Amino acid sequence: MDPSGVFSVSYRQDRKLVRTKWQVLFLLGFMALLYLLPYYASPRIVAIGNIMLISAIVAVGLQICTGYAGQINLGQAAFMGVGAYTAGLLASKYQMSFLLTIPLAGLSAAGFGFLFGLTAARIKGFYLALTTIAAQFIFHFAVLNLPSSWMGGSNGVTVPAATLFGLKISSTSGLFYLNLVFATIMIAGAFGIVRSRFGRAFVAVRDDDVAAGIMGINVARTKATAFLIGAFYAGVGGALWAYMIRFVGVDQFTLFNSIFFIAMIIVGGMGSITGALIGVFIIRMIQEVIATVGPNIAEAVPFLGGDIVFASMNMFLGGVIALFMILEPRGLMHRWNIIKSSYRIWPFPY
Amino acid sequence: MKFLSKLSIRTLAVAGAVAALSHAPMRAQAEETYNLAMLSDFSGPYADIMPILAGGREAVVDWWNATRGKELGVVLNYKNFETRYDAAQVASLWPGIKSELNPIAVMGLGGPDVAALGERLPEDKIPMFMATAGYGFAWKEDSWIFNPRPTYSHESAGFLSHLRAKLGKDEPVKVVIMASEASPAYVDMAHGLEKYAKENPEMVEIVETIYTEVQPTDLTAQMRRVARAGADAVIIQTNTSIVVAVKRALQANGADIPIMMSSHNGLPASGKAAGGIAQLEGDYESYGMAIAVEGDTAPYGFYQMLASDYDLKAPWNVVTAMGMAQGSYVVTVIEHAIEANGAAGLTGEKVREALFLKPITTEETHGMLPTLQFTPEAPFPLEGLKVNVAQVVDGKIVIDATNVDAPVVNKW
C-alpha cells in the first residue's frame, strides 16, 4: 500500500520499485553507507560485510527458487560449491580473469541445478527435498572421487587473487567492493526477474501448479528455470567465495550450509527479495554473536562444558527458525509490511 | 568538604596520570611487547577439548614471559579468537585480528584456519603455527603455515615400521586403513599411507581401505573381512566414533587385531567413548610428540611446573600435551628470532626466517617435540622425523617406544 496521495497514473509508474522520494533518499543513503563502509567501519566489520554480501547473492537465488517458485531446495550450498570450483579451476589452470570466471561459474552451477530442476517437473515436496539433498552428496563424492587432476580431490583448489588492470583484489576492502558490485547487479537482477513474466510464472506455479498449467504456463519448464536461476546465483556467490578465501575445499559447502540458507529466507520472509537480505543479516549476526558470546559463557560457567555450550548455541539458532515458523511463518518482511500499512492508514484501522 | 573531596579526586587523577605517563617510556625501554593471535574453537566441534588445549599453550606463553621473556626484555601478549572451526568465520575474523592485534605469529587449530588463511598469510607476512600433524594437501614450498609434526601418513608409517620390528616380521605388515569421505582430511590421510605402501611393498601391505560414515553404527561385516585377511593392525586417524565401531566389530568377530589411533582420537578419548580404557587393551596411539603419561620424564616435569607455578588447570593428557607442544615451539622460534634480530622491531617475517635458521631442539621444547629442523621445502620438518608410540597394557597407557624413526614418505 502506498502512502496517501501517492498513486500511479501509468503502468510504468505502477511497476516502479522505488515509489516515493523518501524511498529514493533512503535507498541512495543506504547505498552510500554501504559503498563507504570500508572508510568508516573496522576491517572486522568489512570482513563480516563480505561474508554477508556473498551469502546475500546465494540466499536471493534460493529465494527465487524456493520463495517465489515454491521449489524446495536443500542443495544450494552444493550449487555454490560447483561455482566455487569452476571459478577456482578456471582461474588457477587457465589464468582467466574474474570477469569471465564469475559468469562461467554461475553458468556451470546453473547447468548442475538445471538437472535437479528437471526432476522437479516430476516430483514435489518431500521427494524433491530428498533429491536436492542428493545434489549435496553427488557434489561431495564427485569432487573427492574424480581424478585429483580434475578438481583437486581431497587437496582442494588454490585460487589466485582476482586482478583488474594489473591490480590485485585481495585486501578486505577490495574484496568488499568486488562483492558489493556483484551483489548490487545480482540483487537488482533478482528484482527484475521476479517482476517479469518468469517471476509471475514462478508465483503461479508455487501457488497452484495445476491451475498454472491450465492457464498455459509450461510448469515443467518453469520449475526447471527456477532451479537454473537459483543455482546461477549460487554459482556466482561460490565464485566470489573462491576469490575471497582463495582456497576451495569440498567441506566448505555442506548440507549444514544449505540449511543455513533456508533459515535465512525463512527468517527474512519467503517470497521477498528484501526478506532474503534481512534474513542473511539476521542469521549472520546471530552466528557472529554466537562466536562472541559462546566462549564467554563456556568460560563463565565452566561446569556446563564447551560441548554443551556449542550444542545450546546451535539449538538457539534452530530455535530461532522454529520460532519464526510458529509465530511468523511469513518472516520478518511480512511483519514489516503489516507495520508499514498500519502506519500509513493511521489513525484508521483499515 | 565537597570541594576538598573534589580536589582530592582531581589530585589523585592527575598524580595517577603523571605516574602512568612517566612510567610508560621506562616500560617501553625495558621491554618490547608483541602479540600472538590464538585461533580457538570454544563453540564449535572441538569445544569440549578447546579449554584444555588453550590452557596448555597459554600456560607455556605465561611461563616464557616470566622466565626467558623477562631475560630478553620481551613480553608476548596473546588473545584467543573464536573461529567455530569454520573457514567463513576465520575469513571474517582475520582482517580484524590483523588490524587490532598486528600479531607476529598466529597459533592455529585446524583445517579451516589453513583453508581461510593459506593464501593470505604470505601477503600479510605473518606465520601460523599449528598443533596438529600436517596434511598432504598443505605440503607446499614456501609455506607460511607450519606443523611441528609430519603428516598423519608419516606418523602411521612410523608406527608400522615399529610394529613390523616388534612383531619380528620379515614380510610386510598387513594393514587396514579406516577412512571417511566426510572430510577431505581423512581421505588425505589414507592416500598418504597408500602411497607409502605402494612404494614400499616390502614394509606395508594395505589389505583394504574402508571408507565409512564418521559415526558408523555397525562395521561387523567389514571387520570380518579384515580378520579373514589376517590383518596385523587397523589404522584409524579419523575420530573416536570409528574407533569404537571398529572395536565393537572386532570383538563381535572374536578378532584380536590392534588398532592404531592418532592424538586427536587417541587412547584416552577413544577409551572414554568405548566405556573404559580397558576396552582398548593392546591398542596403540602414535604421533610425533610427547606421550602424556606420568613418570620421570621432561614433558611431565614441565607440565607439573606449569600446573604448580603458572595456573595450568588442564589435566595431563594428549590434548594438553598438544597445546604445550604448540606453545613450546612457538616461543622457541620467537626466541630464536630475538637472538638473531634483537628484541626490537620483531615482525612476522623475521619470526618465519628464524624458523629456518637453526633447529628447535627437543631440550628447548622440554621434550614435548623431537628436534625439529624446518626448511622452506615443506611446512613440517622433512628429516629426522620421530614418532612415539603408546599402548594399553593391563588397562593402563604405557609408552611402547620413543623416538621411532618415521620413514620417508614421498609427496602424494
Image (cartoon, coloured by chain):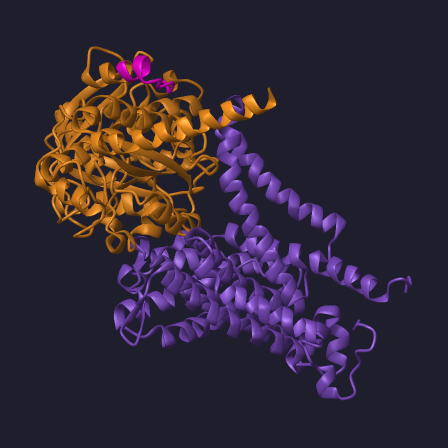
Chain colours: A purple, B orange
Q: Is residue B308 magenta?
A: yes
Above or below, B127 against A145 in this view is above
B379 sits left or right of B283 in the view: left
- Tell me what residue is drawn at x 90 percent, y 65 percent: A350
Report the front residue among A39 and A193.
A39
Residue A254, percent from left and from top: 47, 52
Report the front residue among B1 and B230.
B1
Residue A247, percent from left and from top: 33, 57
Q: Which residues, given as a range, are shown in magenta?
A: B305-315
Residue A82, visible in the rendered structure: no
- Tell me what residue is drawn at x 30 percent, y 54 percent: B120
Quarter of the image with the N terminus of chain A is bottom right
Residue B201, percent from left and from top: 14, 42
Report the front residue among B375 and A87.
B375
Above or below, A241 against B323 in this view is below
Residue B383, percent from left and from top: 9, 39
Q: Quadrant of residue A140?
A: bottom left
